[in-house]
Image: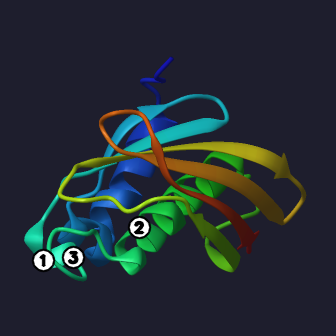
């Protein structure tokens, strides 16, 4: 389910306003109450060798999804910014010349900390990477 709310508009503005997300071509495709989905189109500028998407590109996609999820959990009356305090990624298989989709879920939202899990898959649905993002809200 995708929310058409001010939260979605705000998250979309954050993602499209981030220079790295714009450079990579990341777009927001869905937002739920504690979920987010992003798309990353394949680009020859984001590869390491041949058509293999660079691990740093995938890490950035996971981190951007984590930022979106922390925004969902933030209390606008208390939090005006946030940052990643931990980013853990397991790469499961190479992504060769394909668009990628990231699906993230909030695992725990505390007073000032949000822990989220993000899965990145290719168009065939097979997981390419799985990451955990811990965000600190301030």
Q: Which residue is mark 3?
A: 47
Instruction: Tell me if label 3 and label 1 are in contact, CB under 8 Å.
Output: yes
Q: CA distance from mark 3 to mark 2?
A: 10 Å
Callout 3 environment at 10 Å: few (<14), some (14 to 19), or many (20+)?
Answer: some
Between 125 and 25, the one lying in front of the other is: 125
Residue 113 lies, with reference to residue 27, above or below; the image says below
Q: Residues within 10 Å of mark 2 (few under 14, many from 20)?
A: many
User: What separation in Å lies between label 1 and label 2 (alpha carbons)?
Assistant: 13 Å
Among the two numbered marks 3 and 2 on one chain, the one whose residue lies closer to the N terminus = 3
Q: Secondary structure at mark 1?
A: helix
Is residue 81 left or right of 56 when viewed as pictured? right
Q: Which dot, 3 or 1, sits closer to the camera?
A: 3
Mark 1 neighbour density, 10 Å: few (under 14) some (14–19) many (20 or more)? few
- Left or right: residue 107 versus residue 58 is right
| Picture residue at 62% right of the left edge, 46% below the top | 72
Of the image marks 1 and 2, the number of the one nearer the N terminus: 1
Camera-side residue of 83 and 94: 94
Mark identifier at residue 101: none
Circles 3, 2 touching at the beta carbon (< 8 Å) = no
State which mark lies toward you, 3 or 2.
3
How far across and how far down the image is residue 137, in percent?
A: 73, 70
- Quarter of the C terminus within the rendering: bottom right
Task: Identify the residue at image location x=28%, y=57%.
Answer: 26
Query: Mark 2 — residue?
Result: 58
Is residue 128 shown left or right of residue 75?
left
Camera-side residue of 37 and 54: 54
Residue marked by disc 1 = 45
Residue 61, image x, y percentages: 42, 63
Q: In the rendered image, is residue 76 in sight?
A: no
């Amino acid at each position: 389910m995708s929310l058409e709310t001010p939260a979605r508009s705000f998250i979309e503005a954050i993602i499209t306003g981030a220079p790295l997300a714009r450079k990579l071509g990341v777009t927001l495709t869905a937002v739920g109450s504690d979920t987010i989905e992003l798309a990353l189109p394949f680009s020859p500028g984001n590869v390491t060798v041949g058509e293999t998407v660079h691990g740093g590109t995938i890490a950035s996609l996971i981190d951007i999804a984590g930022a979106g999820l922390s925004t969902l959990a933030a209390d606008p009356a208390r939090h005006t910014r946030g940052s990643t305090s931990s980013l853990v990624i397991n790469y499961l298989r190479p992504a060769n010349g394909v668009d990628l989709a990231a699906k993230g879920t909030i695992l725990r939202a505390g007073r000032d900390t949000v822990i989220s899990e993000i899965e990145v898959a290719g168009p065939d649905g097979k997981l390419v990477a799985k990451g955990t993002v811990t965000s600190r809200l301030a």
